[in-house]
Amino acid sequence: MKKLILLFTIFITSFSFSQTEVKLDIGDALVIRALEFSYEKYINEESSFGISALFNLAKQDIDFRYNENVMITPYYRHYFTSEYNWNFFGEGFIGINSGKKEAIEDSGDFDLKYTDAALGIAVGTKYVAKGGLVLDIYGGLGRNLFGSDSPVLVPRIGFNIGWRF
């Protein structure tokens, strides 16, 4: 029983700093017609983990769009500066993505459906206002690991606006 109480106490105290952010990628929404929502939880002042979900709303035949129709991206961020308002970070992520890739064969054009997982890194900066408004900008690249029908590279680009509570 004492071990259980000790583990519970360690678990609760590890989240005593816990700040949470909920964000929407307005860059994707305005430019590419995709919705990306993010949830980020701080572990301490220097690191956080989160998850984002991208849903591509653009039609397949449009020239400028993500290949991915859906992408779920768990990530870990390490913050390099101690400024409250502006922070520079590095990010490691795993992007579980699915979509369609155009293929050309002798019988004609067709789309190949794929599902894959990408491992990648990104860098960015974040602004946090005293009232809780959050703006972050980041960019990075991942590489799909498993499928032969999936694109080799997966972008991770965003301009998020959200709220910290």
Image (tube, rainbow, N blue to C red):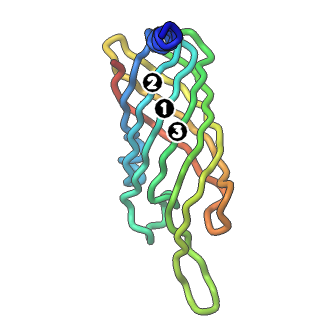
- Say which label, 2 or 3, has the lower sequence index: 2
- Position of residue 25 measured from the top left corner of the image (x, y, whole percent): 40, 40
Relative side of 145 to 100, left or right: right
Instruction: Check if mark 3's residue and mark 1's residue have beta carbons within 8 Å.
Output: yes
Relative side of 156 to 22, left or right: right
Instruction: Check if mark 1's residue and mark 2's residue have beta carbons within 8 Å.
Output: yes
- Position of residue 163 measured from the top left corner of the image (x, y, whole percent): 33, 24
- Say which label, 3 or 1, has the lower sequence index: 1
Residue matched to label 1: 50
Residue matched to label 2: 41
Residue type, mark 3 in image:
Pro
Residue type, mark 2 in image:
Lys
Q: Which mark is on residue 148?
A: none
Residue type, mark 1 in image:
Gly
Q: Which mark is on residue 74?
A: 3
Q: CA distance from mark 2 to mark 3?
A: 12 Å
Residue positioned 62% across, 62% down in the render: 151
Q: Residues within 10 Å of mark 1 (few under 14, many from 20)?
A: some
Q: CA distance from mark 3 to mark 1?
A: 6 Å
Q: Name the element at disc 2.
A: strand
Q: Compare residues 69 and 146 and report the one nearer the observer.
A: 146
Q: Quadrant of residue 37?
A: top left
Relative side of 43 to 117, left or right: left
Q: Name the element at disc 3.
A: strand
Q: Is residue 116 above or below residue 105?
A: above
Q: Is residue 157 above or below residue 133?
A: below
Q: Compare residues 49 and 31 and report the one nearer the observer.
A: 49
Q: Compare residues 116 and 128 and report the one nearer the observer.
A: 116
